[in-house]
Image (cartoon, rainbow, N blue to C red):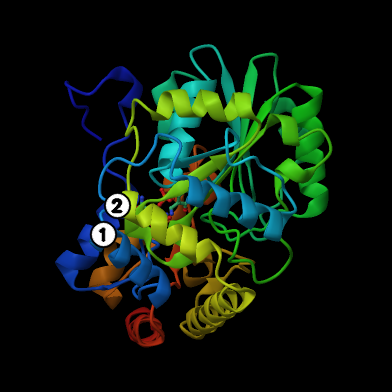
Amino acid sequence: MTSNPFLTERLQGFGTTIFTQMSALALETQSVNLGQGFPDTDGPEEVAQAARHAIRNGHNQYPPLPGIPSLRRAVSEHRARFRGQEFDPNGEIVITAGATEALAAAMLALTGPGDEVVTFEPYYDSYAAGIALSGATRRVVTLRAPDWTFDLDELRAAFTADTKAFLLNTPHNPTGKVFTRDELALIAELCCEHDVVAITDEVYEHLVFDGVHHALATFPGMAERTLTVSSAGKIFSFTGWKVGWACGPADLVTAVRTAKQFLTFAGGGPFQHAVAVGLRLGDDFYVDYTAQMQAKRDRLSAGLADAGLDVLPTQGTYFASCDITSIGETNGIDFCLTLPERAGVVAVPSMAFFDNQDEGASIIRFAFCKKNEVIDEAIARLKAGLS
Ligand code: PMP
Ligand code: GLN
């Protein structure tokens, strides 16, 4: 990668995100885009209608810095209803410009030069950038295919006297792993033992097909040290609205809010009103949504296997991964760059999410949050192109 003389030292090497690159490639080659994870259908009509209503009714100026009160109350009710967590809407919740801003603001507010942040690899790309922006150092612990387990000794060794924060993502992008209760209990113990803040990215919390989603903040000793992050983008299939939130003890949330006020201050006014409506939808919506996405997971996974790919199990999220070793390939980046030409399909090389490139070299990720006919078209193309 060529370096940009204008780009600050901290951001050297970050270039353009893999999602942007692969979506551009899909457009350029007219490929079926199973790269960037965004749904190709809108979310619930009543939520879209609430946004239109809010725009028509004058909710178009800056919302308050922490978010509109009715959304903070809705987030509080949602966390209590689904996770058994208690947050005071006044002080323990801040509404952000998507989970991305919550995570970046958390890094900027809670960590700095000399601090270390532990996270698993593969990791969602903004984690590395957020840690770099804050000047802290990341230490990664590898999740290994095919079941994406980790070595407990490696995890223990990653915690040092300088560890300031542990950044967890469950359900996990890009692997589709849902961390088990036992794994989370171990992580919680280490966070408590080393007096470390946990930041949990739970944006796929309603996309769990196998296993159960547990919030790290609900483990003993964790409520007082955990910032829980989630986002309406993934819950309601309105990823462009960029409404997210961070919940936690008042001091943690105040710290995040302090950084957040100088990033965007506030945003998404009318969408905040709509998300408040969405979070209060009945259980039917949530059950149907998970079932629909599970059927898509099954449809794509079966099709990829039919096309001769070695599909790894995925328990949640929008994503299914494949190991391309079984088809005689070793380098996911090369494979994904030539796949449009070979098959007219775009996937994402998981290597982009690893520090230790060898660990993820042969893994690629497909998004299944697409219309059935789009999934079927991709499968037909892959069958023809890879045979
Ligand atoms: N975390 C993970 C794991 C993601 O996959 C994404 C992408 N949706 C985000 C955070 C960012 O979420 P948002 O679009 O709400 O900023
Ligand atoms: N979260 C999406 C993914 O993992 C991408 C979002 C983005 O492009 N920043 O594919």
Q: Tag 1, which secondary structure?
A: helix
- At a point 78% along the width and 30% down the height, the residue shown is 190
Residue 253 occupies quadrant: top right
- At a point 45% along the width and 73% down the height, the residue shown is 368
* Coordinates of residue 360 in the picture (x, y in percent): 51, 50
Label 2: which residue?
59
Label 1: which residue?
55
Query: Residue 184: in sight, yes or no?
Result: yes
Residue 81 occupies quadrant: bottom right
Three-letter amino acid code at the position of disc 2: His
Quadrant where the N terminus sits is top left
Nearer the observer, 157 or 164: 164
* Coordinates of residue 298 in the picture (x, y in percent): 57, 81
Task: Give the image quadrant in which the ligand numbered 2 is located.
Answer: bottom left
Q: Ligand 1 near label 1 (Cβ, under 8 Å)? A: no
The reply to whether discs 2 and 1 touch (Cβ–Cβ < 8 Å) is: yes
Q: In this picture, is 152 found above or below 299?
A: above
Quadrant where the C terminus sits is bottom left
Three-letter amino acid code at the position of disc 1: Ile
* Coordinates of residue 367 in the picture (x, y in percent): 43, 68
Nearer the observer, 207 or 323: 207
Q: In this picture, is 168 found above or below 364?
A: above
Is residue 195 found left or right of 366 in the rendered image? right
Q: Residues within 10 Å of mark 2 (few under 14, many from 20)?
A: some
Real-space CA distance between mark 2 and mark 1, rounded to the nearest whole angstrom: 6 Å
* Coordinates of residue 158 in the picture (x, y in percent): 68, 27
